[in-house]
Amino acid sequence: MSSRPVKFGAVAVGLLIAAVAAIAAFMSMQASFQSPAASSPVPALACTPAPCANLQGYTLWVSNLAVSGDLVSMQLVFKNASDSTHASPEDLQLIDSKQHASGLVVNSPGCTTWDRHVFNGGAQFGPVSVCFRATSTDAPLILRWSPDFGLFCCQTEIKLS
């Protein structure tokens, strides 16, 4: 007879733990979707020479910008003196004048990519040559950079033209 209340109690405790975990997961998802930092660009610190961006000591410089048809190519150099640990091609998008976002193109001559590169402590990475395909090459062209600083940070936009 005593095993029945123990089983009932164990089931009740298990359901309570599952409910708390589900509520915590739901609240965590709501916070990440409603975070203004995740959806709006963060102002970058000053850097030179432009075009460039400096997010919390992590700097990205753009050089050798070229447009050929719908292909936009450039060279990038990263210097990381921040809490971020790596540079990744997934952190970059080109936003064209029609607000179309495109990722890196690797199937055209001179267009390459790189594997995630781990570095910090003021180390430099690059130059790396990258390309994007734009639906419009009219100004403005913007490079959106979203380095990994954690769940709620950071994204900035570098005006290219």
Image (cartoon, rainbow, N blue to C red):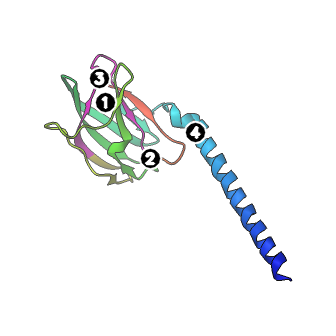
Find residue 148 and name its label: 2
Residue placed under numbered mark 4 in the picture? 33
Which mark sits nearer the N-terminus, 4 or 2?
4
Q: Nearer the viewer, mark 2 or mark 1?
A: 2
Residue at 26% from the left image edge and 48% from the top image edge: 114
Q: Quadrant of residue 47?
A: top left
Quick check: is 93 in the magenta stretch? no
State whether residue 21 is above or below residue 160: below
Quick check: 155 left or right of 13? left
Residue placed under numbered mark 3 in the picture? 135
Residue at 15% from the left image edge and 38% from the top image edge: 110
State whether residue 6 is above or below residue 41: below
Q: Percent position (x, y) of residue 80? A: 38, 47
Find residue 141 and name its label: none
User: At numbered mark 3, what does the secondary structure look like: helix, strand or loop?
Assistant: loop
Which mark sits nearer the N-terminus, 4 or 3?
4
Find residue 49 and name its label: 1
Tags 3 and 2 in contact by the CB under 8 Å rule?
no
Magenta residues? 126-147
User: At numbered mark 1, what does the secondary structure look like: helix, strand or loop?
Assistant: loop
Quadrant of the rendering where the N terminus is positioned: bottom right
Q: Amino acid at mark 4?
A: Phe
Quadrant of the rendering where the C terminus is positioned: top left
Count neighbours of disc 4 (C-alpha within 10 A) and say few if under 14, some if 14 to 19, many if 20 or more.
few
Quick check: 98 left or right of 155? left
